[in-house]
Image (cartoon, rainbow, N blue to C red):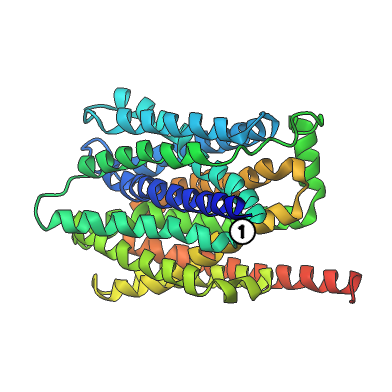
Amino acid sequence: MKTKELSTKKMVLYMRLLYFIFWGTMFISHTYIPIYLREFAFINDFTLGMILSGGFLITTAAQIFFGNLADRSKTKNKVLTFAQIGLVGGLILLSIPKHSAFITLLPAVFLFYIFFVIPGLLMDTIVVENAENAGVAFGTLKCFASAGACAMALALFLMSLFMELRTQTAFILAISCAVLSLLPARRLPPTKGYAKNTGKGGGKAVFKEIIKNRKLMLLLCYVLLLFMGIQATNVFMGVYYASPDGMGAGLGMYGLFFAICIGFETALMLYGNRFLQAMDISNVFTLVSVAAFSRSLILFLAPNIYVLQLCAISQALIFAPLWSRLSPYVNEIVSKEMRATGQAAWSVMAFGIGPMVGAALGGMIANAVGMRSFFGVVAAMLLVVSVVFFFLFRRQRKNEQDLNPE
């Protein structure tokens, strides 16, 4: 018994370390790539939106492919390792050396986006399953992802106090974290792909099962529209906050801003996990959509970088509930053989199709009306999403209660 308990403790430790280290990479690559690309003389707001939209299109296809591959593989861990190595290669080509024309930049950007969210998607799939076996709440593990992102944001701010912080320096840190994350990832227990010997997992079978699953379909529609607004805001928030074209706060202050935001998010996941777990899932989604609306509204109305710190509260109320509840909820509503594919399905909407459309439209709107007015447009769109899906999720819950009165 003692050995088994020690093994469980080690497994939990490796999962925490994996999230903590790897999300340093995710924070930098997700947060700073728009700023990095906008630094090139041949890129404006419109072309930035188009480039990122193309990247997210590639991400969409990659998530479908790797999610299906993981479900049909002997172990999902091998697919995770391959994706981590691919992400390291993409980051290296993207940031070193600095590109001077589209002809070298675009292939590097697109290679990066092939692997951009794949490791995180597979980590969630593997960790959710192992967390169930260990009897540990997923939210208490995923909060270490937020803690790792917060630590990296704070580290970048502290570095800016002693040196001129450049985006390339930030990407070197991201590469280091991605390489280090291979160590705890390799220590996780093998997690098999349940569709390997069942015949499930093929393209037509997957599509039919997703279409027939009404809960999953409603969730996917919600995530698509929600993340069109969230990711459109994310794409231009850094440029608006840090660059001279916006508020001109600089990369270091942007790191501090995110350290505060993610610090709130981590605290909510760690200390509010019981509350989040007790909430009905429809209420969780309503809370998230209202928080996303309020964040874009604050960006539109805030007169200076100090008022923008209010975004920290909205940021926490968007991502803490999502990271705590979304992956376990997907595992509940799909079959065992479809778990990696189910995670890929919502991830495609959140980090593929939604951002692709959001970045393209966002680039056109920001270029036409200005970046600050763009946030107002996004806020209005997210307000509509909040209201519509409040009633849709409420109706779904009522139908379930009618079918299961007990």
Question: Residue 73: where, in percent of width, then height?
Answer: 66, 29
Q: Secondary structure at mark 1?
A: helix
Residue 12 is left or right of residue 244, and the answer is right
* Viewer-proximal residue among 43 and 159: 159
Residue 97 higher or lower than 121, as above or below: above
**Residue positioned most to the front:** 2
Residue 6 is left or right of residue 334, and the answer is left
Q: Quadrant of residue 93?
A: top left
* Viewer-proximal residue among 131 and 351: 131
Residue at x 33%, y 46% (from the top left corner): 34
> How many neighbours does mark 1 have within 10 angstroms: few (below 14), some (14-19), or many (20 or more)?
some
Report the quarter where the N terminus lies.
bottom right
Question: Residue 132: where, in percent of width, then height?
Answer: 66, 55
Q: Quadrant of residue 313?
A: bottom left
Tag 1: residue type? Leu
Report the quarter where the C terminus lies.
bottom right
Residue 394 higher or lower than 350, as above or below: below
Evaluate whether residue 388 shows in this view.
Answer: yes
* Viewer-proximal residue among 47 and 212: 212
Residue at x 11%, y 58% (from the top left corner): 161
Residue 265 is left or right of residue 333, and the answer is left
User: How many numbered marks, from 0 up?
Assistant: 1
Residue at x 79%, y 55% (from the top left corner): 214
Question: Residue 46: where, in percent of width, then height?
Answer: 36, 44
Question: Residue 339: where, in percent of width, then height?
Answer: 69, 45
Residue 135 is left or right of residue 376, and the answer is right
Which residue is tagged 1? 326
Q: Quadrant of residue 150?
A: bottom left
Evaluate whether residue 221 shows in this view.
Answer: no
